[in-house]
Amino acid sequence: MTDAGKIAIVTGAARGIGREICRELLDAGMTVVGVDINDALFAEAVKALGSPQTLEFRKLDVTDSAAFEALVDDVVAKYGRIDVLVNNAGITRDGLLMRMSDEDWELVLKVNLFSAFYGTRAAAKYMVRQRGGSIINMSSYSGREGNRGQANYAASKAGMIGLTKTTAKELAGKAVRCNAVAPGFIETEMTAVLPQQAKDIALSLIPMKTMGQPADIAKAVRFLASDDSKYITAQVISVDGGMHT
Ligand code: NAD
């Protein structure tokens, strides 16, 4: 099938990178169900995306396995299929590991990694039956390299890579693909809250000497969601200004 008319679910869709992913997939002609825990952002996000008929937002806490499965079931009941799942929702709770609380460790693993497993399992059952689908997981440079102050976050994003490769290997024979995108340092509200010193250190590590924009990530996701990448699976694509080589 062509990309136009595909049905996509994007998590963490109400702002930042997720919102730009919605924009790209809508532009490719897909119908997009954006989900987010923060429904207060929905009206603004819909407006920013030009209020297309092919976009809807639904409230979901991606750490709720049963609710995530119910949402996927409901999307398939309404639209007849699910072609693309983008596991993008993510949070940070930074701190040095010796001082990191169990709560901060567990919450970040749950939101960033467990959720992707719940969504993937729920969507895969339909994609396998359809004999086609593309799952895209949001990893990070931190997950590839580790990052001081981010034991929980880096572990969750490294976990995304293992989940991606395993999903790809299990489902490749059914024409279901799974890839990850590993952003570097991207200008969103997630990074806006960092102290200037942390921003300066991050910038000094980027060969291209500038932060990325949400659209830079969204365009890579669009490619992986599209049939243009139909022979690509089990890959991690860095979009980071040259940091990871
Ligand atoms: P952001 O904080 O701007 O947006 C994240 C979105 O996820 C928010 O709308 C938030 O409400 C939603 N969310 C949080 N918890 C949720 C939950 N339990 N259920 C549903 N939705 C939830 O972040 P961003 O910068 O746009 O990051 C998007 C993704 O990209 C994340 O996975 C992040 O880890 C990853 N990433 C970002 C950067 C960066 O530099 N910004 C770098 C590497 C990776």
Image (tube, rainbow, N blue to C red):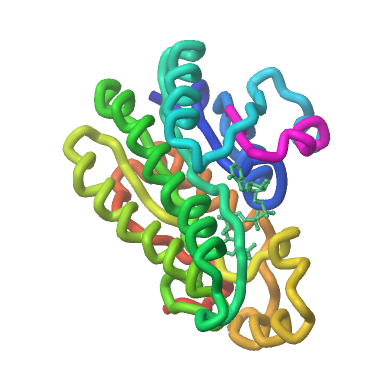
From which residue to which does the magenta span run? 33-45
- Image quadrant assignment for residue 32: top right
**Residue ID at (45%, 40%):** 225
**Residue at the extreme left of the image, as rendered:** 173
The residue closer to the viewer here, 140 or 23, is 140
The residue closer to the viewer here, 114 or 128, is 114
Q: Position of residue 47 (x, y in %)?
A: 82, 32
Residue 45 seen: no
**Residue ID at (39%, 39%):** 118
Above-or-below relation of 174 to 191: above
The residue closer to the viewer here, 56 or 148, is 148
Residue 107 seen: yes
Q: How many marks can you see? A: 0
Q: For the N terminus, give its image quadrant.
A: top left
Above-or-below relation of 159 to 99: above
**Residue ID at (46%, 78%):** 146
Above-or-below relation of 73 to 105: above
User: Is residue 35 a member of the stretch shown in magenta?
Assistant: yes
Q: Is residue 122 left or right of residue 197?
A: left
Q: Position of residue 84 (x, y in %)?
A: 44, 34
Q: Is residue 169 left or right of residue 36?
A: left
Q: For the C terminus, give its image quadrant.
A: bottom left
User: Is residue 197 a member of the stretch shown in magenta?
Assistant: no
Q: Position of residue 59 (x, y in %)?
A: 64, 30
Q: Position of residue 77 (x, y in %)?
A: 45, 12
Above-or-below relation of 206 to 81: below
**Residue ID at (43%, 61%):** 237
